[in-house]
Image (spheres, rainbow, N blue to C red):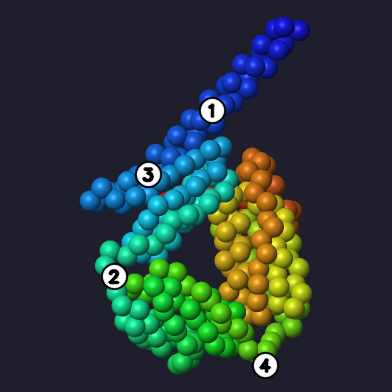
Amino acid sequence: MAVSRKSKRLSRAGLALEKNAVDRELRVKIAAQTPSEDNRRKEIKVDVRDGYVVLSGFVRTFREKERLHRFVMGLRGVKALKDLLRVRPEESIADRQIALHVRQALDAHAELPPATATVHVRDGTCTLRGHVRSAEERHIAESVSSHCRGVKSVVNELTVDTLDEIPDEATSRAVRCALAYCEDFDTDGITISCCDGKIVLRGNVPTMMDRMLAEEMTRIQPGVRHVENHIQVNTQLLLEPIKPEAGDARTSRRSVRKRRPSLRREIG
């Protein structure tokens, strides 16, 4: 009995050491991606515990924050990410000038009609108001505004015009087709439900990248007003053997997983 308890303690200690080693490796990889010029690496703090990553501190642009976010989500071993990074521009710009930059960017975008939104900026926080024709236009307007010079954060109060409302059945069909199109990612285990434009995603996927991609692809589909992502990450799915269905001319998605590491490196 004593030997059994001792072996259990040793196994738990070995598992803890293994987790700590993985956390240290993730911390080193993430720290290497943070900006290093002018000692700016000190402004970004990286904390990793049992695969859960917390980023805190300051970055200069939304693009820098987005790039680091995508890199972390693509790392193997990351279970979840809490992004507490704040944007602190290198130079201060007057709110009136920021609003002008945002309006010009929105009007210049090919997929947005002129005068899509009214823009109000206060202390670097950009608020968008007005009506758009689809959830995709709403998402594009927010993305374009967040990358404009001087913008610290975006409050998106744009509403989808009810005259262009799309039935839930058509919305669900659009989401399923979009997820099925992503052959480099595993979306087979995802179920979709839709009510009044609200999409709820459930199921299991092997990586955080699959979970994130499913939500991003769903959010930009026509008719989608809101997305609730309840997808669970189950890394054991990566260990399942490849069993293509007999008579299926399409390549099994699980057989494509071997290409994912290179894909993650390209994203990072």
Q: Nearer the viewer, mark 3 or mark 2?
A: 2
Sequence order check, earlier mark of 1 and 4: 1
Relative horizontal placement of residue 181, taking residue 197 as reference (left or right): left
Sequence order check, earlier mark of 3 and 1: 1
What is the spatial separation of the Cα atoms under label 2 and label 1, in whole angstroms? 45 Å
Residue toward you, 93 or 49: 93
Relative horizontal placement of residue 197, taking residue 153 as reference (left or right): right
Q: Is residue 263 visible?
A: no
Instruction: Say which quadrant the C terminus sits in.
Output: bottom left
Q: Which residue is mark 2?
A: 92
Identified at 36% across, 58% down, the residue is: 59
Q: SS at mark 4?
A: helix
Q: Which residue is mark 3?
A: 31
What is the spatial separation of the Cα atoms under label 3 and label 2, in whole angstroms? 27 Å
Circles 2 and 1, Cβ within 8 Å, touching? The answer is: no
Relative horizontal placement of residue 188, taking residue 28 as reference (left or right): right
Q: Which residue is mark 1?
A: 18
Amino acid at pointer 2: Ser
Residue toward you, 36 or 184: 36
Amino acid at pointer 1: Glu
Relative horizontal placement of residue 172, taking residue 265 as reference (left or right): right
Measured as percent of width and height from the top left, residue 216 is found at: 57, 66
Q: Which residue is mark 4?
A: 163
- Image position of 158 with respect to 189: above or below: below
Residue toward you, 124 or 229: 124
